[in-house]
Structures are given as C-alpha cells and as structure tokens.
Amino acid sequence: MSKLKLGAIADDKPVKVTAELPASVHRDLVAYAEIHGRETGQPVSDPARLIAPMIERFMATDRGFAKSRRGSGRDGRTGSRGPSIPS
C-alpha cells in the first residue's frame, strides 16, 4: 500500500474558483481520488474536492513560499498581516 501525501479532507466553507486542467491532469486527479478513497476509507464523490487540499499541502511544504511569507509579515493563514504590536 502506498502512503499518499494527502490526508482526510476537511469539510470547510468553500470559495468558488473555476479552473481549466489539462486532460492528463484530470485523469491523474480521478485516479488519485480513487486511490485516496481506498486508503482512507472515505470515497471522494467529486475529484475536484481534492484540488484545494492538494494546493494547501503544496503551499505548506514549499520552503521558498514560507520564507517569503515570513519576510513579508503575513501570518500564513488568512493572507492578512498579523496583529500589530504597539511600540
């Protein structure tokens, strides 16, 4: 059995985004959803639901992105600046 990088899918309030995928990427996404469903015991009814967690995982493990975000003062979750500290 393989160890997928993607864990359980959180049920969160979504924001609608439309994107076009190359056919080969869509086929891989469908295959990934099937394997993910078998390994987690949570069948994925719509493979598109995997896109957000995949992007989230990618950004969370991208060291260059994390370093750049820390340097800009962003908090990493909301994209907004963290709380200001009075001087």
Image (spheres, rainbow, N blue to C red):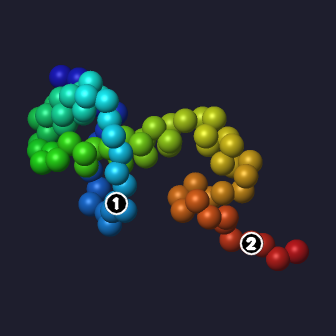
Position of residue 78 measured from the top left corner of the image (x, y, whole percent):
54, 62
Task: Out of 12 and 85, give the one closest to the viewer.
Answer: 12
Reading the image, the residue beneath label 1 is: 16
Image quarter in which the N terminus is found = top left
20 up-or-down from 69: above or below? above
State yes or no: discs 2 and 1 in contact (Cβ < 8 Å): no
Secondary structure found at label 1:
loop
| Displayed quadrant of residue 87 | bottom right
Position of residue 45 measured from the top left corner of the image (x, y, whole percent):
12, 48
- The 10 Å Cα crowd at callout 2, few under 14, some 14 to 19, many 20 or more, is few
Q: Amino acid at mark 1?
A: Lys
Q: Amino acid at mark 2?
A: Ser
Q: Which mark is residue 68?
A: none
Residue under the point 20% across and 42% down? 47
- The 10 Å Cα crowd at callout 1, few under 14, some 14 to 19, many 20 or more, is few
Q: Is residue 2 visible?
A: yes
Badge 2 or badge 1: first in the primary sequence: 1
Spatial CA distance of label 2 from label 1 is 31 Å
Q: Residue furthest bottom?
A: 86
31 displayed left or right of 81: left
| Displayed quadrant of residue 7 | top left
28 displayed left or right of 80: left
Secondary structure found at label 2:
loop
Reading the image, the residue beneath label 2 is: 84
